[in-house]
């Protein structure tokens, strides 16, 4: 029999603060051996939701993130992690939070009787020392028994349904009228324990490290990454939708509201050194209008409609060379040292194009207003999407890098695969090349 190769030391204990006043969430944690502190965020939920596109996932993620980060920034009691949660009930395509009044609760309970809806619960786990966060959503289908008018009267009279998402609780008086739950029960109660475990694992840690005595964390050795995280004391806190998302595909992705980027391409005409120099000087003086420049040096319609001609030109080294603008990611950044294209997290108030454009401009100094979008490809992982916009850039426009990049380079499309690529870009490249460029 093999001996397990672990050193016989306990993993370090870690503490958790719950950014919610929900007694059901606290009780769920306590029953699972986690004696969390409670600190309420005071976040204005209406304000947070004002500019957010109203998918249930985005709403619960935005609120969970706002609550946990607000508490992490202003902790009353020192703690290692803060968890924020928010639940919404989706029924007949409409999203419901708390009913706040007996009248609203009655109306909703009447509608829900004998039917099925989906309870979405967003979770955001913040490591206080580093400010890093990892978020995830649990979804559960909840089927109700038929409610009699007498039950609804009696239930509303208890007060229980008034201040809970979806006008019901699974762990209280409403529990006996739930016929079936498809998904995690604790997510319906308000905090998904298996999701919390996965979020801890996403940081390289174990949920057993949150257990309070008499329970002890499991034996084991921290990974270098987890040890570094726990030792980090940084003032840096993520803003907006910056942060990692634990996706249903099992991976973590950057951008709680999804992410987007622009794969810019151009038809590059070889200019003599003098001419290139002149163009550069004209741009500096602002005498060459970028739109005019676009018109004079590119043939977008021909490039996108007459593929055969283009390929021929390309192969014979006549005419323009087709290039894409790639970014060598700075070593300190995620997947540093690999090549990708400019992009990043989409903020809560932005559309994917707006987010991709803002990131592109920050990272290249090229105004997206001079780009001609020719296609969009969405990688859809349900709770997380990456939108790639393919857009043509006028030849001769200078890209100036910011701190995200070690280098920006216009790369011949046939040379892209010779570079060490960001894994997700490597996966999508052949498809992007096929779909939009050749
Ligand atoms: Zn995914």
Image (spheres, helix red, strand yellow):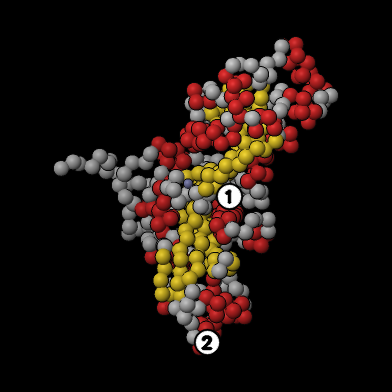
Please report whichever mark, 2 or 1, sits nearer to the chain's N-terminal start: 2
Q: Secondary structure at mark 2?
A: helix
Q: Badge 1: few (under 14), some or many (20 or more) residues near its Cα, within 10 Å?
A: many
Quarter occupied by the N terminus: top left
Check residue 149 in the rendering and tell me which mark sits there, or answer none.
2
Q: Is mark 2 within 8 Å of ligand 1?
A: no
Outermost residue, bottom side: 150
The residue wearing badge 1 is 257
Which residue is pictured at 68% across the width and 59% down the height? 50
35 versus 101 height, above or below = above
Camera-side residue of 314 and 65: 314
Camera-side residue of 150 and 266: 266
Place residue 39 in its image quadrant: bottom right
241 versus 178 height, above or below = above
Check residue 350 in the rendering and tell me which mark sits there, or answer none.
none
Q: Secondary structure at mark 1?
A: loop
């Amino acid at each position: 029999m093999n001996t397990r190769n672990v050193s016989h030391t306990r993993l370090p204990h870690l503490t958790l603060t719950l950014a919610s006043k929900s007694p059901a969430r606290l009780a769920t944690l306590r029953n699972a051996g986690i004696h969390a502190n409670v600190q309420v965020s005071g976040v204005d939920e209406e304000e947070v939701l004002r500019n957010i596109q109203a998918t249930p996932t985005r709403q619960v993620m935005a609120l969970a993130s706002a609550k946990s980060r607000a508490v992490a920034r202003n902790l009353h009691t020192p703690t290692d992690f803060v968890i924020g949660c928010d639940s919404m009930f989706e029924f007949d395509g409409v999203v419901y939070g708390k009913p706040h009044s007996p009248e609203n609760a009655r109306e909703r309970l009447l509608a829900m009787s004998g039917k099925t809806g989906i309870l979405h619960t967003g979770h955001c786990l913040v490591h206080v020392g580093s400010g890093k966060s990892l978020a995830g959503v649990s979804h559960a289908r909840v089927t109700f028994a038929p409610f009699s008018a007498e039950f609804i009267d009696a239930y509303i009279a208890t007060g229980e349904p008034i201040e809970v998402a979806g006008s019901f609780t699974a762990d209280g008086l409403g529990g006996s009228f739930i016929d079936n739950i498809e998904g995690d029960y604790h997510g319906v109660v308000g905090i998904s324990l298996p999701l919390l475990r996965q979020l801890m694992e996403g940081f390289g840690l174990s949920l057993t490290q949150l257990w309070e005595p008499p329970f002890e964390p499991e034996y084991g050795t921290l990974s270098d990454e987890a040890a570094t995280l726990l030792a980090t004391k940084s003032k840096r806190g993520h803003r907006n939708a910056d942060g990692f998302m634990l996706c249903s595909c099992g991976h973590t992705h950057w951008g709680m509201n999804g992410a987007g980027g622009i794969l810019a391409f151009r038809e590059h005409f070889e200019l003599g050194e003098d001419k290139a120099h002149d163009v550069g000087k004209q741009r500096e003086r602002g005498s060459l209008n970028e739109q005019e420049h676009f018109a004079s040096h590119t043939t977008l319609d021909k490039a996108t409609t007459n593929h055969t001609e283009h390929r021929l030109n390309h192969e014979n080294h006549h005419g323009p060379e087709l290039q894409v603008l790639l970014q060598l990611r700075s070593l300190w950044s995620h997947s540093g040292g690999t090549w990708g294209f400019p992009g990043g997290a989409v903020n809560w108030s932005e559309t994917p194009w707006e987010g991709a454009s803002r990131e592109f401009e920050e990272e290249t100094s090229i105004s997206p207003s001079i780009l001609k979008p020719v296609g969009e490809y969405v990688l859809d992982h349900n709770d997380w999407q990456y939108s790639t916009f393919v857009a043509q850039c006028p030849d001769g426009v200078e890209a100036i890098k910011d701190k995200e990049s070690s280098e920006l380079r216009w790369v011949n499309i046939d040379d892209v695969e010779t570079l060490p690529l960001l894994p997700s870009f490597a996966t999508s490249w052949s498809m992007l090349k096929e779909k939009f460029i050749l």
